[in-house]
Amino acid sequence: MLYLTLELPKRIINDAIGSQTEIVTFYGVDMAQVTFLAVLCTAFLLAVLGHGLLKMRINTMKGVLSERMLRRFRYQLIARILRFPQPYFERVSQGELVSMITAESEPMGGLMGDAISQPVLQAGQMITILGFLFLQSFWFGVAAVSMIPLQGWLIPKLQRQINLLNKKRIQEVRVLAASIGESAAGASALRVNGGWRYRMAAVTEQLGRLFDIRFEIYQKKFFMKFLNNFIGQMTPFFFFSIGGYLVLQGAVSLGALVAALAAYKDLSSPWKELLAYYNQTQDMALRWDVINERFAPPGMVDESLFSGDPEETPTLNGDIVLDGVTVSDADGNQVLDDLNATLPGGSVIGIAAPSEEDRRALSDLLTRELLPGSGKVRIGDRDLSTLHQAVIAARIGRASSRPVLFQGTFGDNVMMPLRMRPQTDKSEAEHFAEAQRAGNSADPYDAEWLDPKLAGLDDPQALRAWWLRLVQGMGTGSALFRRGLDQKFDPADHPELAEKLVELRPKVQQAVRDAGLRQYAFLCKPELYNPALPVGENLLFATPRQPITRELLAEQADFLAQLRAIGLDRTLLDLTRDVIDMLRQIFGLDGTDHPLFRKLGIDPATYETAVELVEKTRSGGAEALSGGDMALLLTVPFRISAEQIGPAFSADLQARIVELRNSHARELQDSLGDLFSPLDMGNFAPGFTVLENAMFGKNSEVAGSKGDELRRVVAGVMEENGAQDLVIELIYDVPIALGGQNLPAIFAEPLSFSRATIKRPDILILDRALASYDVETQEAVFKNLRTLLPETTLIYINDGFENEEVFDLLLEVRQGRIVSEDKDAEGEEDSGASADLARKVRALEQTPLFSGLNRKQLRLLAFGARWYNAAAREVIFLKGDQPKDGAYMILEGEAGLYLPKEGEEDQLIAKVGPGTLVGELGLIRKEPRALSMAAETELTCLRIGEEEFLAVVENDAATAFKLLQVVAGYVSN
């Protein structure tokens, strides 16, 4: 097809236009010259059309292929993230991974589509054109190919230099991205501490480095283009000079020269495409190396243990054996060292580990988030490292006080362990087929995933009942119940609760009266104005089924027309103007982020627009407003109540609204369709919370402590009448924002606990999951868990336990080693610097002040510390000395702190022994020593340098808090 588009123009010029006779013979057929011209032109047009359609089809399929391959590539990268070892996430930022999967992989998709088709298509076109040129004249062909070797050698060489600069640019962009993220997170600290100018200078330096790299890229890139274009124009020079000479000599025809020039023009395009393809492959090779480096960390979970379903899902109710287990961090430092222990199956085990690093490593080890560098973890006769991930997910539960939450609902997060595989095949056929062609998951997203059988139950109702038992057993039922009182819900989803609330209304209202709290409850009565309801709801005596927005009100043309007909539109606009003026005086235009403003429920954008519209009505009146503007202003009365407005909402206006309600409420409700639900003592109110539905009214915002008492009275009636579990079930549907940002911390622990126990695991690991509970509650939970999960191995990991009798086995882990009464600290056989460092670390960790430091901070502190020995009665420092020598941590012996007296014996202020840090106040305050220190007995100390000590205090909040407690003790003494 391409050859025809080159051959036909030559034939048109030489055989049709350049014919010397009016009759042309073509393959034995005689035809007029004009007819022959028309045939050749038509054939040329069809050839061009066919060639274009063919290229369009090829390019379309290339695009489809590239998108499928890009989709497959991104899917595989995301799948690899799920197999990363947990410690790896501490060394690589989430933003970097996201950028690689989204932005940096995007250009690779285009290359994937071009990988085969581009070189084949362009090389085929190039060979066709060169063949055509050689057929016209040998010298035309030589001229066409003469510059290709030079370009093929020179351009890739320059491109490699540009690619290296691009790699350097990507690295600098990542550094800049990290700096931007750090600046955004610490903007407040920069403002408060005056660091923004220095920070911006650092940003300027980074942008400058980026500019220099890009400038060098531009220089090389455009020089390469200039050189390529210049070399490319040398061939036309040969055609014009040599070709023109051959035409003048009669060696070739003019039509052949014109066709050759046209062919060469077409030749430059595939050659440039091939060069661009080569450059792109080199660039993508660098990108691939960078991405591969990030997405292939050591210690990844084997893909065969992660994909598909296991052949069997065995129970893990045997003994847990730690056989010489050693775990190291990314820097090669040992976190857990030669652990040897047997945790009896089905027992209650406590592991006390003061170090957070030890606790995290232990829980990660038992869930295979960490793989041991040496040794093995066995459960019964099974090696944990060889189990399929689905077996671990089904049989081992882990709860912590800071769970990772996902966007969805509370129930979605709780039931995650029971959504292991799809239970139905429902899926849209075309989308599913396309996903398979792209190599994505074979599991349909829109199928039913919940499998109650994984928890040994038959249906979702039984599953919810089991969840309620877990919540009550954990002692969080009351907290969830209180949260549930503020929930709104659809009666179609919870008909039993809706019916129960309506049934309890008389009892609740009577209980409120009996408690003397009637004046703090604004009950809904048709003949009275309710100050706690928004003005619009009072007028309609109805509650909205969905939030009232500007767009929604603007669609209600009949409603707005009726407001004008009864003359209430101007009244409501005047009221809105007064409210907006009041809010503007209080909050201004930049105070919309204030908690009090957010409490009003007015969208900041709506408020800002309303301020502009109010100014517009001052000059032009209500007539200056369009229908949309009127709707926006009317959203204010549908959001704010008379109680919030205050004295500006007069009693006369309240009486007028009640009068209009009695005469026009039904008409207004009808004009709004099913947007509002009428308030009726015998019907559920969709716009009310559980508490408000039970009262059939609103709680006064100015009730203060009486409002809390009112809530307790209502909650008490509901608990007495069996509504508590029904209300707690509402928590199941509470929406959770990205990262759980909208979920209070008090509900994070119940969610984590529920998620770990809902599947009835064989092994349950509680990593400080009950940290916020008092000792009595913790003991009650221990007992309840044993009752709810009688055969489960329960492992409690905490920094310490006050009641050790509740455990069948108690282990203590310090400095990554299991401590026992008959086994002193190990490692004494080590030699050299490492042994000395280990001794210092163990000594520091055993002191109350530094016991909570993580391993890295302890090592840094120990590295800068020096052993100090003093004989009895030796003076260590004197009052008035500069504290440059540091602070002294006493390990053995006793020292005295003295206040020197002129002409008298020094006064003994205190005696201090092992575990006491002396001299830290001088370091913190940067003032001379306040007392003298002398050894009372032989003394062994660790002298901690000023810089190392202050670095720990500044960077570890727990240590700073302990130090504050020590200083407070000095003051009290």
Image (cartoon, helix red, strand yellow):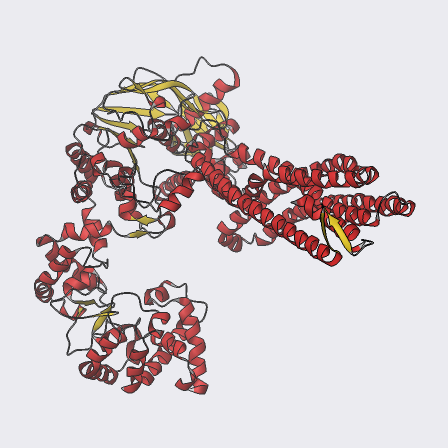
Residue 878 image position (x, y, % from top left) = 50, 33
Please state which of residues 352 and 580 is positioned toward the viewer in this rendering: 580
Work out which quarter of the rendered image holds the N terminus and state it.
top right
| Residue depicted at x 35% and y 65% | 596
To which quarter of the image does residue 252 belong? top right
Please state which of residues 260 and 249 is positioned toward the viewer in this rendering: 249
Left or right of 506 on screen, residue 452: right
| Residue depicted at x 43% and y 15% | 828
Please state which of residues 9 and 638 is positioned toward the viewer in this rendering: 9
Work out which quarter of the rendered image holds the C terminus and state it.
top left
Question: Is residue 567 something one can see in this rendering?
Answer: no
Residue 189 image position (x, y, % from top left) = 50, 52
To which quarter of the image does residue 705 belong? bottom left
Please state which of residues 591 and 408 is positioned toward the viewer in this rendering: 408
Left or right of 44 on screen, residue 917: left
**Furthest-right residue in this view:** 249
To which quarter of the image does residue 559 belong? bottom left
Residue 753 image position (x, y, % from top left) = 26, 39
Residue 784 image position (x, y, % from top left) = 16, 36
Question: Is residue 132 something one can see in this rendering?
Answer: yes
Left or right of 106 on screen, residue 16: right
